[in-house]
Amino acid sequence: KKIKELNSKGLLIKPYSDLKKAVLDAHKIACPQDVVILSPGCESFGMFQDYRDRGRQFKKIVKSLT
């Protein structure tokens, strides 16, 4: 219900369980000057070794976009 409510206010909120898919989708739909915020809604145990690994994977995905 809250996601629908926020989306109706012009915010696009969509849950993802895959970092790469979230980044690629954000890149696809964002326009110049848009602000994209990727915020974990829960722990990511099992997906990454630690916060450094998550950061490295995020940077690798973003660098692959250019």
Image (cartoon, rainbow, N blue to C red):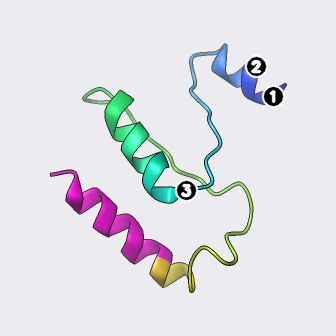
The outermost residue toward the right is 1
Q: Is residue 57 left or right of residue 43?
A: left
Residue at horizontal 38 percent and vertical 76 percent from the top = 56
Q: Between residue 14 and residue 33, name the one nearer to us.
A: 14
Q: Mark 3 sits on what residue?
A: 18
Q: Mark 1 sits on what residue?
A: 2
Labels 1 & 2 near each other (Cβ < 8 A): yes
Relative to 38, say whether 64 is above or below: below
Label 1's element? Answer: helix
The outermost residue toward the top is 8
Q: How many marks?
A: 3
Label 3's element? Answer: loop
Task: State whether the magenta stretch is mostly helix, strand or loop.
Answer: helix
Relative to 10, say whether 45 is above or below: below
Magenta highlight on residue 2: no
x and y, in percent, of residue 65 in the image: 22, 51
